[in-house]
């Protein structure tokens, strides 16, 4: 059995040379959670990961919207070369011009580009994409739905407005988005700006 003097030396060594022995575990105060306090927030790494994922999704949605705008610009300017770069060669489509039929490939659309249907009949064209809604279907696929509002001036200088509703499916291949399918409806009547009616 160790002597009392050796026990005292052990205690002093433990507390760094002091003369008071360390308190027993039971003597430590118990800290109770205060009412109204929530659990600590998630770690910065967790928040950062969530923010990165959200930013990545938003960036891909903006890419799809931008590609849709470029495609419509190619249509408005009659640029078939740009149109073919944006669309898949086996593009499928439902549109009013096809009279309810599903068309596949580029030949059907090429007819309108070759004959400059828009360029010949319009002095100016402006298209606005309204309320674009993008659904990401994985890392390499997306679907966008929107209202396409087109303003144009005919050769007689009369202004017109035309609305259609479009849905487009995009597929990313070789780090490039391509339109693989679209569905266009024109349920809204067109509007003609008659200057005499606004005098």
Image (spheres, grey):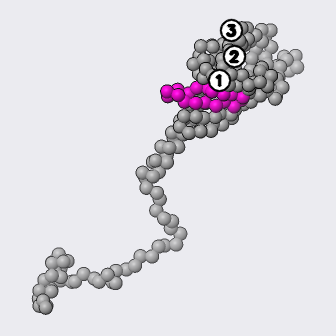
Tell me the element at label 2.
helix
Disc 1 + disc 2, Cβ < 8 Å: yes
* Residue on which the image places disc 1: 91
Q: CA distance from mark 1 to mark 3?
A: 18 Å
Tell me the element at label 1.
strand
For label 2, count other residues whose C-alpha is less than 10 Å away and answer few (under 14), some (14-19) or many (20+).
some
For label 1, count other residues whose C-alpha is less than 10 Å away and answer few (under 14), some (14-19) or many (20+).
some
Q: Report the quarter where the N terminus lies.
A: bottom left
Residue sitting at 45 percent across and 52 percent down?
A: 46
Residue sitting at 51 percent across and 39 percent down?
A: 56
Answer with left or right where residue 43 lies relative to residue 186.
left
Q: CA distance from mark 3 to mark 2?
A: 9 Å
Residue 54: image tag: none
Residue 176 appears anywhere in the view: yes
Answer with left or right where residue 148 lies relative to residue 170.
right
Camera-near label (1 vs 3) is: 1
Foreground residue, 85 or 150? 85
Q: Find residue 169 and report its horizontal and vertical position in percent.
A: 64, 31
Q: Find residue 161 and report its horizontal and vertical position in percent.
A: 78, 22
Q: Name which quarter of the figure residue 60 lies in.
A: top right
Residue 109: image tag: 2
Q: Find residue 188 and report its horizontal and vertical position in percent.
A: 82, 28
* Residue on which the image places disc 3: 114
Is residue 131 found inside the magenta-colored segment of the image?
no
Q: CA distance from mark 1 to mark 2?
A: 10 Å
């Amino acid at each position: 059995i160790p002597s009392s003097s050796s026990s005292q030396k052990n205690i002093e060594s433990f507390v760094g040379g002091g003369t008071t022995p360390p308190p027993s575990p039971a003597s430590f105060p118990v800290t109770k959670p205060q009412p109204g306090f929530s659990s600590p927030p998630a770690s910065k790494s967790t928040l950062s990961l969530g923010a990165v994922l959200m930013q990545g999704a938003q960036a891909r949605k903006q890419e799809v919207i931008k590609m849709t705008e470029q495609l419509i610009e190619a249509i408005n300017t009659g640029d078939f070369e740009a149109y073919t770069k944006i669309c898949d060669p086996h593009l499928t489509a439902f549109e009013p011009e096809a009279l309810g039929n599903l068309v596949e490939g580029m030949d059907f659309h090429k007819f309108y580009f070759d004959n400059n249907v828009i360029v010949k009949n319009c002095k100016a064209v402006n298209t606005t994409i309204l309320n674009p809604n993008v659904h990401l279907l994985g890392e390499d696929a997306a679907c966008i739905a929107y209202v396409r509002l087109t303003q144009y001036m005919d050769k007689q200088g009369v202004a017109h407005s035309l609305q259609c509703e479009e849905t487009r499916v995009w597929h990313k291949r070789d780090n490039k988005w391509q339109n693989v399918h679209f569905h266009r409806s024109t349920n809204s009547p067109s509007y003609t700006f008659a200057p005499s009616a606004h005098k």
